[in-house]
Image: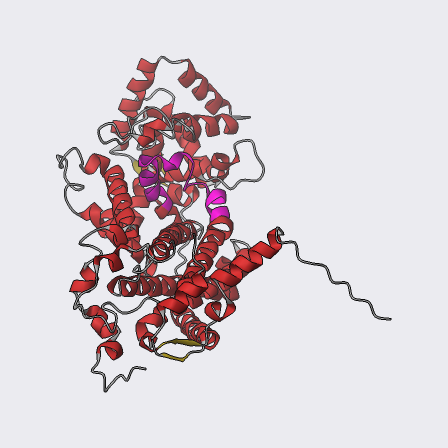
């Protein structure tokens, strides 16, 4: 005889509460939408997704380079190709990210409670610059030598050089292949979740509005999430 | 009470016409497109990889510059010799009024350049070398006054030095003390590649810290000459370039721009900011600008520009088009 083993859910379960919170704040049809407002049909929206695509290629090529070690690409044609792929993926990543940033600026993408999304985006930009900088320092060639020798002055003047020694290859390489990429990836995931949670911002001067200009509250940012 | 964001998004889009959209397909198309582009550019343009400068290369290519730099290290007249924190206390470091972070954190990476780059390597190499051992003993037993006289005379003589078979020769004189022996030995060690190793060992077998050899090479005229030829120096917008006409960190254009304009190019400057504390001033300026960028949503004026500049009407032209061109539900 079959028996059922039904147990009532404990409403105080941390797991249950987390699952319900995720369901409430980011249901799957918001995380992976199959429909969007019609005004999203603009090329500007492509800059965000191609930035993520470039980041994926940066990480993939970087994983190959870090697996083979920092010397490999200097002596191997295949290694040189992967270094080139890494180098140009980084260039594309920054080009797309800057275009995405400018696009979001002129769309005032921070409106209606999206200020934190914008701010995280700026932090991603700053951490990406630091990540790329440690990459340039990790090349183990003439460029990395000269960049290190020059950059030390700015780092030291800011006091950072006492802890962030650009002349220490081991420290820069460790930061470049481990901590900083993890930081960028986590921030990008948070950024995407924030975008998917709130959805894309409406055009300036929403339709149906009798006003000819946006309201100040649209431009302040944090609105609508807390009641 | 925190409102569920799922409900908020549904409310936000209420009344807005929705159209089919395939997020995952878009992501895969972007991955493919960007991947093809990156692979093609990588195959066609490759990437920069000019070999590093070794101390051995430097000592071979420009022995007079090498010996002059090493002599200046002993006199503590090089950049690293008088740098200040975090390497030593020989210089004040950069400051702007009471803002002096270079001084705040002390000497965390101690480097005594004369001792580290010249005396210690020579001591290691003096085993079995009687002439060098005697010269070193003479140097270390001498008063600082005698050392200064020898350094002064030798430095002046180096201005007219000649090079024969890679060896540096200065006019014969008895005013150099032990420096002729010390420097000819140091040059020989450097040309043989020994100094490259001696400056990174520091009693360890494995090494990843190149602080000492990079500081020493950075003190030379040789490296800066190569960098200038490759358009890499600060006054040449060097951060934007890599060797071989490859792009550098082009995203730092604004940061490097400040190094090209007053007050950071001026000895007198403005409000205490000048070329002597340009690094600190520019770091402070860029920190403020980055914070302003992050806080744009809260800064009146900056946050209103998108409303005033009708670029958004191009981006959302379908939305702003006449109703018959963009039927709405």
Residue B242 appears left or right of A173? left
Decide whether residue A153 is among the magenta residues: yes
Residue placed most toward the observer, A217 or B269: A217
Give the color scheme: rainbow, by chain, secondary structure or one colour: secondary structure
Q: Quadrant of residue B10?
A: bottom left
Decide whether residue B132 is among the magenta residues: no
Residue A141: percent from the left, percent from the top? Answer: 42, 52
Residue B181, relative to residue B48: is it above or below? above
Q: Is residue B129 visible?
A: yes
Residue A40 appears left or right of B310? right
Q: Quadrant of the N terminus of chain A?
A: bottom right
Residue placed most toward the observer, B295 or B49: B295
Residue A65 appears left or right of B154? right
Identity of the residue furthest to the right in this view: A1
Residue B100: percent from the left, percent from the top? Answer: 29, 29
Residue A184: percent from the left, percent from the top? Answer: 44, 54
Give the residue drawn at x 44%, y 55%. Answer: A187
Residue A66: percent from the left, percent from the top? Answer: 53, 56
Q: Is residue B230 visible?
A: no
Region in magenta: A148-175
Give the residue drawn at x 35%, y 27%. Answer: B104
């Amino acid at each position: 005889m079959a028996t059922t083993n039904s147990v009532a859910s404990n409403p105080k379960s941390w797991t249950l509460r987390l699952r319900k919170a995720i369901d409430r704040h980011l249901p799957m049809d918001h995380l992976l939408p199959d429909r969007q407002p019609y005004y999203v049909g603009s090329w500007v929206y492509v800059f965000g997704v191609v930035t993520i695509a470039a980041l994926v290629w940066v990480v993939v090529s970087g994983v190959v380079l870090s697996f083979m070690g920092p010397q490999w690409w200097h002596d191997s044609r295949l290694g040189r190709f992967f270094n080139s792929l890494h180098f140009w993926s980084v260039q594309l990543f920054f080009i797309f990210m800057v275009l995405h940033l400018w696009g979001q600026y002129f769309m005032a993408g921070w409106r209606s409670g999206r200020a934190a999304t914008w701010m995280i985006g700026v932090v991603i930009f700053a951490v990406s610059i630091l990540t790329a900088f440690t990459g340039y320092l990790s090349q183990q060639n003439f460029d990395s030598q000269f960049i290190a020798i020059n950059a030390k002055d700015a780092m030291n003047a800011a006091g950072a050089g006492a802890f962030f020694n650009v002349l220490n290859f081991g420290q820069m390489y460790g930061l470049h292949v481990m901590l900083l990429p993890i930081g960028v990836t986590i921030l990008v995931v948070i950024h995407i979740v924030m975008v998917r949670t709130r959805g894309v911002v409406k055009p300036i001067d929403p339709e149906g509005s009798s006003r000819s200009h946006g309201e100040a509250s649209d431009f302040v940012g944090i609105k609508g999430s807390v009641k | 009470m925190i409102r569920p964001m799922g409900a908020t998004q549904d409310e936000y889009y209420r009344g807005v016409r929705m159209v089919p959209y395939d997020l995952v397909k878009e992501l895969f198309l972007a991955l493919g497109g960007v991947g093809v582009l990156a692979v093609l550019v990588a195959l066609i343009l490759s990437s920069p990889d000019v070999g590093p400068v070794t101390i051995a290369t430097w000592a071979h290519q420009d022995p007079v510059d090498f010996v002059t730099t090493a002599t200046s290290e002993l006199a503590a007249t090089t950049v690293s010799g008088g740098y200040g924190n975090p390497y030593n206390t020989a210089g004040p470091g950069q400051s702007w009024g009471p803002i002096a972070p270079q001084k705040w954190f002390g000497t965390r990476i101690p480097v005594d350049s004369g001792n580290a780059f010249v005396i210690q390597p020579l001591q290691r190499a003096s085993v079995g070398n009687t002439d060098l051992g005697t010269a070193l003993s003479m140097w270390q037993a001498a008063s600082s006054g005698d050392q200064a006289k020898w350094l002064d005379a030798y430095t002046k003589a180096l201005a007219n030095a000649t090079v024969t078979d890679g060896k540096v020769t200065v006019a014969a004189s008895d005013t150099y003390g032990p420096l002729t022996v010390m420097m000819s030995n140091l040059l020989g060690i450097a040309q043989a590649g020994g100094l490259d190793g001696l400056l990174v060992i520091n009693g360890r077998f494995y090494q990843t810290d190149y602080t000492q050899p990079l500081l020493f090479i950075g003190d030379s005229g040789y490296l800066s000459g190569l960098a200038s030829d490759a358009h890499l120096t600060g006054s040449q917008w060097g951060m934007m370039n890599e060797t071989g006409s490859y792009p550098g960190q082009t995203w730092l254009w604004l940061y490097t721009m400040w190094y090209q304009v007053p007050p950071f190019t001026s000895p007198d400057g403005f409000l205490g900011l000048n070329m002597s504390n340009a690094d600190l001033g520019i770091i402070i300026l860029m920190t403020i600008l980055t914070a302003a960028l992050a806080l744009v949503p809260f800064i009146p004026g900056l946050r209103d520009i998108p409303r005033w500049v009708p670029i958004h009407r191009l981006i959302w032209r379908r939305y702003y088009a006449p109703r018959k061109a963009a039927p709405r539900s």
